[in-house]
Amino acid sequence: MNQSFQWDAVGDAFPLLLEGFRVTLLATVLGTLVAAVLGLAVAVAGRAPSRFVTVPVKALTEFVRSTPLLVQLVGAAAVFSSVEPLTIGIIVLGIHYAAYTSEVYRAGIDGVPKGQWEACRALSMSPRRTWQAVILPQAVRNVLPALGNYAISMFKETPFLAVITVQEMVFEARKYGADHFVYTEVFTLAGLIFLVASYPTSLLMRKLEKRLGH
Amino acid sequence: MATESAPLKEPADAAPDPQVTGVEPLVRFDKVVKRYGDHVVLDELDFTVRRGEHVTLIGPSGSGKTTILRLLMTLEKVSDGVIWVDGSPLSHVRTPSGALKPAGEKQLRESRKKIGMVFQQFNLFPNMKVLQNITEAPVNVLGMDKDEAETRARELLDLVGLSGKVDAHPSQLSGGQQQRVAIARALAMRPEILLLDEVTSALDPELVAGVLELLGDIARNTNITMLCVTHEMNFARDVSEKVLMFDAGRVVESGSPEKIFTDPEHERTREFLNAVL
Ligand SMILES: Nc1ncnc2c1ncn2[C@@H]1O[C@H](COP(=O)(O)OP(=O)(O)OP(=O)(O)O)[C@@H](O)[C@H]1O
Ligand SMILES: [Mg+2]
């Protein structure tokens, strides 16, 4: 074990890890998309006038939030064993994060002043048009930075998908490591790729945050 | 005036059919009660406004002036009693038996179309340009053609003296300019009744006169019925034909501005006017 760092293994594993990274990225982007859309739907449903809507929605989000992502992944993979693991991974990631993004949207919606709702009512606008033209555009603007931060955390949690045999980057790294007995090198490389991808993204988010916050 | 079945405690069925009387006021508060919990804000309030009339509501803070406008705009629900607008119940519908029950959201939205409101804090939509603020409801609520709505919006902006600000965002406007846009936005819906709740109190002093002048013009040049809550007694005197003095959710007295301001009958009115003038 006390050998020096094997640089040639790094070069050797790199293409494989990149292949895995492609999957990681795909899962993050699509998972974020699901979380963004579903979270919004949950937040809007949470403000429905009927308890028949709000109570189940609240119970479901509570459930999702209080169980670990790993358990949800393994559970979903077991129940839907005929579905492709990557698809399950994306949907579970999306649902898991929707439980959090819905909270972000809720705060964003609550942040729209009461006067905006009243102005809409005074103009006889329909609830649908009120949401679409007035409330959501203002709420979403408030929540974009927070959504971006969740996208980054989701990105860093994609290695959990390896557990349900999704061939993302860490899955590939482990496989290469097991085949060639060079864990340190490939995992260092995988870590570096994560860093290189997420650090600029967080910087970008912070910039966006500043711009939106005036 | 016998009362038969009354779902709410209903003073309304004592009301004559407006079509028959022919002199039905445009707005009639009929024993309107508004409670927040145990706190009675309006206590069997009765008053009427004729079509085309410009009425100023005055009274001490907390006397219920804003509440009256919010009830008329159906932003709040009445606790009891009925508000009649143009001979129809504003926030009630008739059941087949002829009794009145609270209206649903759809019917309320219909009722609202006759009424416009301008708020103290303007409440323009910050995510839309000035022009779209004005065209949004005519297009999407009244189904007006987009070009027609824009033409009209431009005319209205001209009227309120802001033709140069068509493409501005609300945040780029002064308070006075924002309030003018808000007035244009309300007028774009061609309301029969315009509600104005202290529309100048959030403005810098030097911007107040311009907005009041605009409202005076609207009062003189249109047949829109106006209900104004204001602390600007000059405006009340110049623009309105009738002043209603409220206290503790009741009309203390009402009359022409000259009468109320120079020769009030009630001690309470005198006290109030001494405090504000
Ligand atoms: N949403 C609410 N919940 C509880 N109480 C309320 C609510 N809105 C108004 N009130 C109460 O109703 C009363 C009348 O309020 P309203 O705003 O109509 O007064 P106002 O005459 O407009 O006063 P001001 O001149 O200060 O604007 C006040 O005592 C107020 O505290
Ligand atoms: Mg008030």
Image (spheres, grey):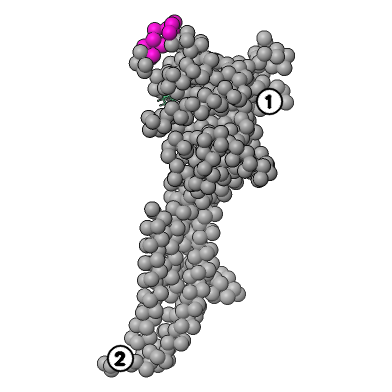
State yes or no: residue B67 in magenta: no
Quarter where residue B30 is shown: top right
Q: Are marks 2 and 1 in contact (CB under 8 Å)?
A: no
| Residue B24 locus on image (x, y percent) | 66, 15
Up/down of A130 relative to B40, above or below: below
Q: Residue at x 47, y 62 (%)?
A: A97
- Residue nearest the viewer, comparing A66 with B91: B91
Which image quadrant: the N terminus of chain A?
Answer: bottom left
> Which of the chains bears the disc numbered 1?
B
Badge 1 marks a residue whose secondary structure is strand
Mark 2: amino acid: Phe
Mark 1: amino acid: Arg
Q: Residue at x 62, y 32 (%)?
A: B190
Q: Is mark 2 within 8 Å of ligand 1?
A: no
| Residue A34 locus on image (x, y percent) | 53, 63
Q: Residue at x 65, y 45 (%)?
A: B146
* Neighbours of disc 1 within 10 Å: few (<14), some (14-19), many (20+): few
Q: Which residues are magenta?
A: B262-273
* Residue identified by numbered label 1: B94
* Residue identified by numbered label 2: A5
Badge 2 marks a residue whose secondary structure is loop
| Residue B60 locus on image (x, y percent) | 40, 19
Q: Residue at x 51, y 10 (%)?
A: B255
